[in-house]
Structure formats: C-alpha cells, structure tokens
Amino acid sequence: MPHIIDAPVDVELSADGDPRAFIWNRFEHTVIGQPQAVFKRTRWWEDKGTPTRIDTELWRLDASRGDEEQHRYDLRRGTDGSWVLALDWG
Amino acid sequence: MTSAPGTDFAHLHVASAYSTHYGVTLPEALAEQAAAQGASFLAVTDRDGLYGAVKHMRACVAAGIRAGLGAELAVHDQEYRSLGRVVVLAHGNTEGRGYGALCRAVSAAHGGAAHGGAGQRSAITTGSTGPSISRDRLADLAGLASLTVLLGPDSDVGLAISRRDNTDAAARLAHWQRALPAQSVVLEIVCHLAESGTVGSVTPATRMLALAENAGLPAVLSNAVRYGTPEEAVTADLADAARFLLPLAELETPQTNGQAWLKPAGAMRQVARMVVDAGLHDTGALERLLRDTEQLADRCSLDPTLDIGLGRPRMPEARIIGVTGDPVTELWRRAKSGIADLYSMSGSRAVEAAHAQLAHEMKTVEHLGFASYFLTVSRVADIIRGMGIRIQARGSGVGSVLNYALRTSSVEPIANGLLWERFLSPERQTLPDIDIDVESARRHDIYREVFRAFGSDRVSLMSMTNAYRGRGAVRDAGLALGLPDAQINVIAKQMWRFNARDFRRALEEKPELEALATEVRESQQLDLLVDLTAKLDRLPRHISVHPCGVILSDASLLDRTPVQASGMGLPMSQYDKHDMDPMGLIKLDILGVRMQSAMAHAVEEHHRLTGESIDLDRVPLDDPKTFELIRSTRTLGIFQIESPGQMELVGKLQPEVFNDLTVEISLFRPGPMKNNMPLKYLQARHGEVAPDYIHPRFELILRETNGVVIFHEQVMRLFDELTGCGLGKADVFRRHLGKPEQLPEIEEYVRERALARGFSAAVIDQVWTVLAGFGSFGFAKAHGAAFALPTYQSAWLKTHYPAAFLAGLLTHDPGMWPKDLIVAEARVLGVPVLPLDVQSSALDYRVEDLADGSQGIRLALPELVGSTETERARIAQHQPFGSLQDFRDRVHPRRRTFEALARVGALDTFIGYDRSRRHELLAHIQSLRGTAVVIRADQLAFEVELPVPRYSGDRAGAITSLELRGRTQTDLELLDLNLAVSTHQMKRFHALFKELGVTPASELGNLPGGTEVLLAGVRRATNTPPMRGGRRVVFISLDDGTGPVSNVVFFHDAQERVGGQVFQTNYMLVRGRTRRSGARGVSVTGENIWNLFDVARQVKERHAVERAAAEEAASAAAYAAELAVQTQVSTTHFSEVPGGILHHLRAAESA
C-alpha cells in the first residue's frame, strides 16, 4: 500500500532534466535507473480560473537513502517548478 | 545545417492552426518557436490537407530554418476498409516531385476532384465521411522516392499495437511494406507520457519501436504536435469540443493530457529515453531513433524555390490562350489593333498618345515577363463576352491602355487621368491583379466555361479561410463549458464592436456591457468563458470557396496546389488569397455584380419588346438628361449612388460630367469621409473658397479636384513632380505613407529633391503636410472610374428606359432598398406594377406594353410565397390557360399554392377579372377534395373532379369564402407576396398624415432649409455610414408612399434622446428640421421619433372622446333648452331634475 506523504521536497535534476536526487527529511534520496514521467489530465473546466496547464506532472522513480533498500516514489511538480513528494509506494 | 547537438530536434508531425478544430497554433508562431528552441527543421502536416503549407514555408524562410511539408491523411484499402490515419511527407531536393506527389495525394483523398470528377468522391471509407486516400493510389504517388509514409499510433498498425495484438500489427505492417515502394514506410513513435494503460503512454510506444526493430524498418520520434506551448493545450481542448460538438465534460476521447506541444530537443530526448527504457531494445536504440528522425528530416527538407516553386509565376501555356508564336509579339499585335479600333474616333492626337502610352506599358510588361498574363486575362474576358455576358474590369488594372486596348477593361484611361504605374511597375513586387465584374446570375456559368476552355488541370477556384470572430468564439467556448444555448445566445448577441481577444477589457470599459460584466463577476463559469472566448478569437475555423477568385495556371497547377471539391462542385484550391502571390499563382477575381445582371435584363427586355439592341458600353457619356436625373437626387436604384448618404452628396455636388461621378464615388469612402475631404472639395467646387493648388506646378495635377487631393494617382503625380522619382517609385512612396515609421525617410528624400528641383521650403512644408496627412486614405481613381461607368450606365437606363430598368432591378435586386420601394419608385415614374397573373407573369419581371401606349411591369412568379420552383416552371411553360380546369390539369399546383394564387388574384382571369367574385373562386378551390398524387418532377398534387361550376345566375346561392372578408388587396398581397403592388401600404395612413400635418416625402424638396417638419412612413433602410469624428450617425429612410424616401439623420444628441427606437421602430412619425444639401437635395435632421401605431391609436381615442363629448354636448344643450322652458313654468321641479343633468351641463361647458 502506498503511503501518502505530500511533503515539499528539493529535487536535483540531471543535465537531461530528469530527477537525479531529492532531499526529504534532510536526507538525500538518490534516483536509481530511468525515472518515468506521467502527465495526468485535469477536468480544469470544473475549477476556478483559467489554467495554464491541463495536466499535472508526476514522476515515478526508484530511489534509496544511502545504502537502504530502494523504494518507489511519486514526485509531483507544480506549474511553478516546485516539487512535492506525493507517494511512497514502498 | 544542423545546430549544436542536443538543441536540435526535427519535428516531423505537426498540425498548425489551419488544421481547423484540431491544431491551435499559427504556422508563423510554430516556426519562430522552433527556431528559438534551436531547431533547424520543422514540418507542418495539417490534417486532410496543406492548408497552412504556404504560410509555413514562408515562416520557415523568415525564421531561417528548413521546412518540411506533409499531410495527415486517412487511408483505406481496396475494400474501402479503414487503415487509420498516416502522415505523408514530401521528399525534398526532387525538383518538386515530392511536393507534387503530396499535393496530388491530398487531392486524391478529397475524392479526386483533381481528376475532373467534380464533386464525386472516389472513395467511401468505412465509419468515416471525411477525406481518405486509397493505399494503392498513395503507393503510386510514393513512387520514384517522392514520399515517406509515417505509420504512427493512429495507423492500423499503431491501433493493433494499442490493442496489444502484436501479430496483427506485424501482419499489417508487412502489408504496407508490400503495397508501398521500398523505403517509403517508416514507423512513427509517439509518446505523450500519459498514464499507463491510456493512449499516449510509453508502453505502446516502446512496442512500436520493437516492431520497427523486428521488421528492420527505421523508426522516427515525433510528438504529434497540436500546439506550440503547454499553455495552449486548453485551446486544443476547446477545439476538440467544437470538432465533436460536445461539451468537454461529455467528450469520449479528450486528449489524454497536455503534452502534444512543440517540445524542445531536451524534452524530446527525455521522452526517447523513457520509451527506450520501458522495453527491451537493441543497444544503441536511443541514438538510432534520434538519428533516423534527423535523417528523415534531412530527406524531407524542401527547397522553397526548387521544390515548391515559391515566388515563380506560371501562366497558362501559349497554345491554351490561342497564341502560336511569341506571346510578346502577339500581345503587341493585339494591343495595336485594339488602339486602332478604339481611338479611331478620338482624333490623331489621342491615337498618338495611346500608342506612346502602350509602348511605355509594354516595356514594363516585357521586363517583368507578364505578356502571357495579359493575354490570359484578355482571353478570359473574351470568353465571358463570347457568352453574351456583361463584363466590367475594376481595380487598378483599369489604369492601363493595354487592358483597354485588349478590351479587358472598358474605361478609357488617358482622358480619365488614370495611371499605369498604380497597377504595375518594375518597383512593384507583387503579381498584377485585375478584377472583373460580371453579371451575378451568370457567374457559375462563367466558371464552368473557364474550366472547360483552359482545362480543369489548369484552373481551380480559390478558397478563403474563415477565422473565429466574437460570436463564433463565444458560442464554441460556451459549448465546451456546457452552458445552456439560451444563455450563450444572450451573450453572443452582445459580442460586437470589439475584438473577442479584448473581451475582458470591453467588459470593464463598455457601459452597454455592464449587466454582463456583473454576471461575469458573480459566475466562475462565465469568468472562464471570457478567457476561453479570447483564446479562440482569430483562429482559422473553416475554409470555403472564395466568392470570386479563380486561379489560372499551366498544366503543373495540380502539382502545386491541392484541391478539394467546393460547394458548387468545381475544384477549389486549399490555398487562400494570401498564398497566391508567393506561390506564383495567377488569380483572377471574377465577381458577380447584381447590377450588371439587372442592366443586362433591362437591355434584354428592351430587345424583346422592340427588337432594338442597346450597347451600353457605347452609350455617350455626356447625356444631359441622365445628368439631370442624377442631379435631382432621384437616384434610387442607380449603382453606387442610391444610398441616403450618397443621395445627399450627389445633391451637394451636382455632377455635370462623367469625371464628377468618379470624384463623387471616390469621396464617399471611409478614408476621405474621416479626412473631411467631401466638405473641402464641395467648398472649392462651389466657389466658397478658392482652390489651393499650393504651387503652379501642381495645378495640372490638382485642378480636376479643385485643389483637394483625393486620388492615389494625384499623390503619385505630386511625388513625381516634387522629386522626379518616376511614377513607379512614386507609387511605392504612396503605399508607404500609411506606415508612420517610413515617413521620416520619405520626408527627407522629398525635401532634398524638391529643393533641388526649385521648390521653396514653404511650398515643400505645405505639400508635405498634405501628403503626410493623406496617409493611406484616398482612393485609386481607377477604382472610382470603374465604378462610375456602371453608375452612369444604370442612370442612363433609368432615364431613358425606366420600365425595363426597374424590371431589371426587381428581378435581380442589386441594391440596398427593399422591393417595396422600387415598386413605389415605379409608381412615381408612372410605370405601373401589374398584379400577379398566371396568364402573363413570368419567372422574372417582364415589361408589358399597355393599351394606352405606356409600359408596365408584370409581377414575377417567384414572388409568390411558398410556391415551388417546379410549380412556377410549369406555369411559365404552359401559359396561357384556357380555363381553371386547364390550369389545374397542366400545372398541378399544390393546394397551398393553388389557394394563394386565387387569394392574391392571380387566377382572376378565370372569373373575368371581377374581383368581387374572387371569394367564390377561392371557396370553390378550397372545397375541392382529392387524394394526393405524385406527378411529373416528383411534385405532389391532388387529383380532383373538375368541371368548374358556372359562376353565374343566382349569386345568393353561390358558395363563399370568408378568407377575403375585411381584407384589402394590399393585405392579401402582403400576405402572399410580401410585396404590396396594387396600392402603397402607407395609403391607409394618409388621412392621418393630413390631419397631423405630415409633410409628404414628395413635397420635402420644396421646403427651405431650417423648416420644422413632421415626417412619417415605414422604415426602408437604416445606415450608419462612417463619419468624421467617429461619432455614430444614423440615417433612416422613410417611405410614405408619395415619393422615393425622406431621409432623416439622427445625430448623437438625438440618438440619446430617442434611445432604442432609432433602430427598433419600423412605422414611425418623426419630428425634425430640414437641411438643404445643394440645389435639389434636402434631408431632415431628426429630433424625435414616435411609433406610428401609437400615434394612430391616440388620435383615434381622441376622436372617440371628442365624438362622445360632442354628442353629450349636443344632448346637454337640448336638456338645457328644455330646462329653460320648464323653469319658466315652475321652479319647484328643480329638485326632481335627475342628478345627471348637472354632469351633462358641466360636460357641455368643458366641451
């Protein structure tokens, strides 16, 4: 079962623009392998205001803290470029 | 050509905004964005066509990147089964072979209109009604390495992959490989990073890549782009809603997410990595994918000149225009012989001048290589004339002696002071443009004949792109949000006089939108609607056939433009007028003008009745009676000068010669009006101010307009006189006057040269002020003169053959006025309009010679409301009729038509034209019973027993119909014809008008200026012409049945007082003050408006009150007299007097 985290995190990007690491609870989590981006569309017409995007950006990636066992995480990037650690899939 | 690695990615599959209701970014924006992102190549592949192709090519040239072209097309197999949609890309460096194949593939998808099968679809696709090309045809066209076909997610292969049916996908791919030439099939990998299990996720993309590897085929990465930036994904959602005509919430297949944007190289590499990483692929798969993409882009880079032929004009081949030798020699020969013919009557000096001018023009023509162009246009003019159709050239081409000599134009340019250089000069960068006005009723016949004469592989109609405007945008945005229709309608009605892009600002600023602004503030949905409407504004919405553009070219035409069937069946290019010049396509505007049809009808009618032929083009242009009519301002029905504003200007100007008409027409334009030119000109013309020629050397140029600069030609001559730059260069300066940033440079040049040429600084100051103020205003005199000719011709016809002319007007309805008013004008001119009669009414208005030697106009059958074309055709075919039964047997009218004919009196012939018996006839027809039967031409009629009863003898026992009771002939005519011909509908008000002291329109001209008047009538026209100062002025033309119309003008203050009535009330009483305009013209400045029906009711009520009061007064007086007698007898009875008496007395007193 995934844990809902929903915490803002700092994300370090590679030269290619992929997340390479993120810092959560002061610990750096290093991304392992090719992270996958997923864009999910919204029903924006039901919300207030005119959107600048019609989808939300999620990155599903495997990462580990130091030598610990790797977990699968979902990171969400806002339109302002800020990152939120959404889910820990375990 | 490639830029630094990592920043260059070639997008091969991109829909521009010209993929209507799909792509949402204009080609120019896409090319700029691609270049800014570091790309060196961009393809545009619009859906079902090359709609944005030319704009894309030019944008890429401007942005300095290479361009590719393709189209996203549906494909079907031999059994017409759908093979999905593929992208067809043209190969470059093939000397146009690739682009030509692409054009023909698009045309083939649209049903092969290219093969002369006008409007016939050669392909019927399953489950789709849109364009589709057969795979076999596509394979033919892809031969000689001309095309690459991209099989992506929407192809049958991609669809099999998304069904996870890899075996089927491989089989289908193998089929494609067998069908198409080697190396023309490439797989297209698209991944929009959608959620797993949905369209656009990595899974099908990585499987597609594996399929390519297994088949040994190249695969390319694309992003199936629909918009430039992620922000525009919202607009694409709206486009989807508009395409499926469904609210967003109900779309079955909305776009999966907002990733179909023109991603830069880094983002595309990211996608590529994820696709490769998601499956098991050979080593180097990532680099190979990107390399194959780049290589295909290299192969599809089109050279704008060598591949597309950009900027290279192509005229029809010499033999097609009937030339065997050198076109230049032939053009010389024809032009010289034309001059000999046309100028022979004008004296040797005129002939000499014409030859000199011809030599001057031919130099430019030879220099620019346009000889074939002139021969082509004159060939078209000959074709039209050969069909017996009236033709009139318009536009700057009228300034050419060459065009006049070739009889393309019928206005003599030299005496009219027109300039060749306004039309063509070595300094002009664009292809020449000649517009031809023809009879509107024959326009389609002309198109067909031109297609026949030139061959359908050389001719195509032109299309036009219709863009979203306010109302359409708000409707489609409202649809997307699922707003109720009624609500959208209310909002849409308010969307005018501002751009939808500025919707929000308009809400803040415009007081009339206050209520809507409040609603928007309170509703989240409406707030959204405002933004979405602005997003749609100006986007291409659909294409349709241009009203007059015909493209003429050589046999390569269909290799240079894709065509599709137009509404009228003939092939239409997917390119619009902006694409013509860059593509070197010669466009001829053949515009249908109703006045030309009306005049042709008048000439025909005259010929039919008298056997005399009138050659309108040879009518002397100085007929005094014609000018007298024009000066009288009774110009209703005359071309160009019949509007109230024109009537007023004609009245003030008092034209005396043909050139005055040219001036008048040129003055009545938005530019000159805003610049106050009419007033300046009139003051100088009537000697109120002395003409100011600034300098004697300008007098020759400005004399014809009394010192006021009106024409483009004058501006050109001034430039030439000031600087000696030559007229060609002068025209360049003239066009630049409208661009403020160019002014300082021109001014410097003018000042320097003018000083050197002996003009004083003061003169230069003065003339420069005039030139700079002229801006882009004014009018080409060539246009004005070309308009003035039909103006004069129609005035001449009205003067000399009013019946025939009015019959033409009534048949073709060319002007601004409703037919009622033309009928009223006929009445005033002593030409009766004769009632509808099945014995003599034809399909058009015919002139009839009357017993008293005068002429009348017989009402035409099409005026009968609700009658069908086949019924009318049968009446016209079989008339005259011996009896009612004969009529019924041969015409078989439907019940509705039969009764309407009887009601309105068209069958009165069968009752001896005894109107009082019409009710019997109608009752008889109504009493007929029978079953509906199908007769010739699929016409329903009813089979009945006739003989017609004998309407004689016992009138009391005769049957009757109540339908006619209490109705006047006018009522019946308005009911069944929408047109009152027997008497004027205002006649019933005439007693009221007399009582109120209303001035009849016919008397208005006799009043001095400043007289307070009451006017009344039915509104016939409302005009809001452009006015100096920008304040709206409303002209209302009232028809009271006595004269043509009285024109009332409401200025701003009166509009405020009167409010909405100025637009809403149709039957009105107006108070105003007369204003003289010239010797004969008069108009009225309106002060107030009342609804005529209200006034009539009030008067009636007052009459009733007065009548009652008068009666009471009379009876009271009687009582009083009686009382007087009684009091003499005895005063004691006073108390017994009924209480009413006092009341009566008071009433009598007040009365």
Image (tube, grey):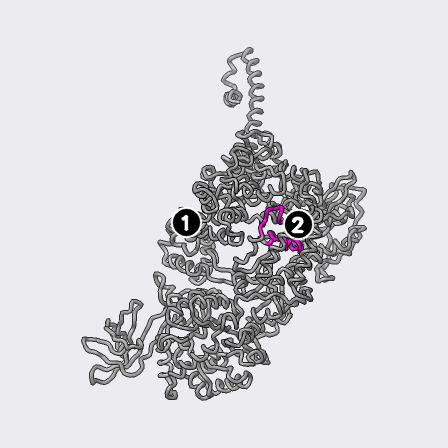
Task: Tell me the chain of label 2.
Answer: B
Q: Main secondary structure of the magenta part?
A: loop
Q: Which mark is residue B465?
A: none
Q: Amino acid at mark 1?
A: Leu
Q: How far from the left and from the top, in percent, is residue B202?
A: 38, 80
Of badges 1 and 2, the one in the foreground is: 2
The stretch drawn in magenta includes residue B455: no
Q: Which mark is residue B352?
A: 2
Task: Tell me the chain of label 1.
Answer: B
Which residue lies at the image location 55% right of the left edge and 79% below the top edge?
A: B142
Number of marks in picture: 2
Up-down relation of residue B586 to residue B9 (above or below)? above
**Residue that badge 1 annotates:** B513
Q: How far from the left and from the top, in percent, is residue B838?
A: 74, 49
Say whether residue B937 is left or right of residue B99: right
Badge 2, how many Cα within 10 Å: few under 14, some, many 20+?
A: few
Up-down relation of residue B1084 to residue B773 (above or below)? above
Q: Amino acid at mark 2?
A: Glu
Which residue lies at the image location 50% right of the left edge and 52% below the top edge?
A: B725
The answer, for residue B817, to whether it is visible in the render is yes
Badge 1, how many Cα within 10 Å: few under 14, some, many 20+?
A: some
The stretch drawn in magenta includes residue B401: yes
